[in-house]
Image (cartoon, rainbow, N blue to C red):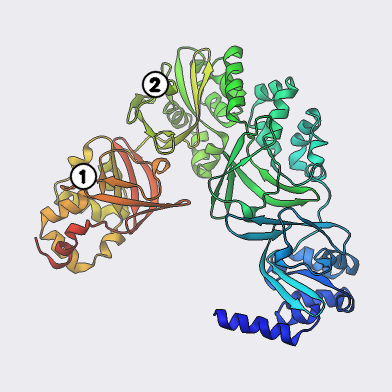
Amino acid sequence: MLRVLCLALALQAVLGGNLVQVLQSEGESTLVSLVQKAGLADALGQGTFTIFAPTNAAFAKLPADLLASLSNDVDALANVLKYHVVQGSIRKQDASNEAQLDTLAGKKIRLNIYSHNNEVTVEGSKITDFDLRADNGYVHIIDTVMLPPEGSIVDIVAGATELSTLLSKVKAANLVSALQGDALTVFAPTDDAFARLGTTVLNNLANDPKLLKEILEYHVVPHTEYSAGLYNREYVRTLDTRHDVIRIGVSGSSVYANNAKVTKADINASNGVVHIIDHEHIMLRVLCLALALQAVLGGNLVQVLQSAGESTLVSLVQKAGLADALGQGTFTIFAPTNAAFAKLPADLLASLSNDVNALANVLKYHVVQGSIRKQDASNEAQLDTLAGKKIRLNIYSHNNEVTVEGSKITHFDLRADNGYVHIIDTVMLPPEGSIVDIVAASSQLSTLLSKVKSANLVSALQGDALTVFAPTNDAFARLGTHVLHNLANNPTLLKEILEYHVVPHTEYSAGLYNREHVRTLDTHHDVIRLGVSGSTVHVNNAQVVKADINASNGVVHIIDHVLIPLRFLGSAIFGKK
């Protein structure tokens, strides 16, 4: 509690001790033993210093081979430890954002202050405890061991084999000197990220250095943004001509910059920090230019897919013998990205690759006759596919998402000579029947099926554009035998409760948002409250355990609790009307 903490700090100030003794009193045994091993204990007992002290847990996060290597190389160990020590007394009140401090290792360390969450970092490591006072300086506790950077941002890029394309583009755009400036954050696309742009786009960039420079500068933020300072829905301005923004998304330990995922974060450089990302950023105004160029360049649908870099889809279209057919006639393709195919279970993708008829059926499910543009889309519209089944469009106004069978459309209206391509983030699989069929086919929903039949709701669930939050058998079992008995003896009550699980429009995950209230089919059209936190979705007190199961007439989300409207709670428990 606070009074004990204050007493402890007061005692420490009275008892004193040099820096090493303060570290010992804090229980940071790993750091103390390494300081002694490196022969630095006596030196840190004389003079005035500030130590940024990694915890035992911080050392435990280091790769075991690196820690062993440091332990066996006294000079290297001493260099790393000196990188944590600054001459003089530096207290929390002395810290300022982007301030750099000279360490005993001869390299600087950078302080950052993030006002939105009150975090203070040093080289991206969070300072968890400040101003532990010693006779000859101060100790600040940090949560990560700092390793001296291996050069500037350009050096980091040049030293990473997966960033060789970025390096060549930086040189081609004459941006090397700009990336030598101080206090920069670079979101660095991998070679694979550039490859996803496709050969046509890459050729266009190679032939337009000004455009290339704009796009590369859009990956650079003119201040240091370590992971500890990033937050969900943060917008940061970049170095490109108009200082366009990139949108940060944080969900648990995953970080996104626009549509790109950070695959490796917080790579320290002498002049900032590098985060490696898996997609190339293109700002909206440049994307519009790219689309205009594409419209001029033309090409049939398969050629447009190739230029968009969707190599997996192109290869599967060719394998299924559909390439020639898609080159003739007018079509609209909802095209899954390479990443979308990578999300499929490996055995399913292998099975499709080995069964040409099944593969062709899945691919045809992504193709619609005629030209359908974004402006033609309407909520709940259904389109006839070449597979003989319909696909459903949904428009969610609160976040401007448009989905097809629940898959987000990430890029619209890529024009071809004979139609349009829309890029989607998930492979669509033809549904295996209606909502009732989905429930009947699932062994974990057998109780729900029996209750639906008892309440004479089968025909109601054959209606169109429905969302069903389907409780599992275990969810019903949690109600207890007494409540289940009451429901069995009161068909009207059972019907009300079951209808409370049905929403009269399609609500895919992409359209759900935190604190959304949706009305249901029960008599009073009671509302259910949605809670969205990262990838976790709650419906009232129930959690969605499996989402977005497509049916021919809507979508099913499986949940782990039965939902009961508050007005019927007493009747369910006590058996009253």
Q: CA distance from mark 1 to mark 2?
A: 29 Å
What's under tag 1, amino acid-wise? Leu
Q: Viewer-proximal residue, 107 or 254?
A: 107
Q: Position of residue 274 (x, y in %)?
A: 72, 47
From the image, tell me which residue sits under label 1. Answer: 521
Q: Secondary structure at mark 1?
A: loop
Regarding residue 62, the answer to whether it shows in the image is no
Task: Judge left or right: residue 389 versus residue 76.
Answer: left
Q: Vertically, is 85 above or below 185?
A: below
The residue under the point 79% across, 48% down is 271
Quadrant including the N terminus: bottom right
Classify 10 Å Cα crowding around label 2: few (below 14), some (14-19), many (20 and above). few
Using the rendered view, name the quadrant where residue 148 is placed: bottom right
Task: Judge left or right: residue 382 versus residue 401.
Answer: left
What's under tag 2, amino acid-wise? Asp
From the image, tell me which residue sits under label 2. Answer: 376
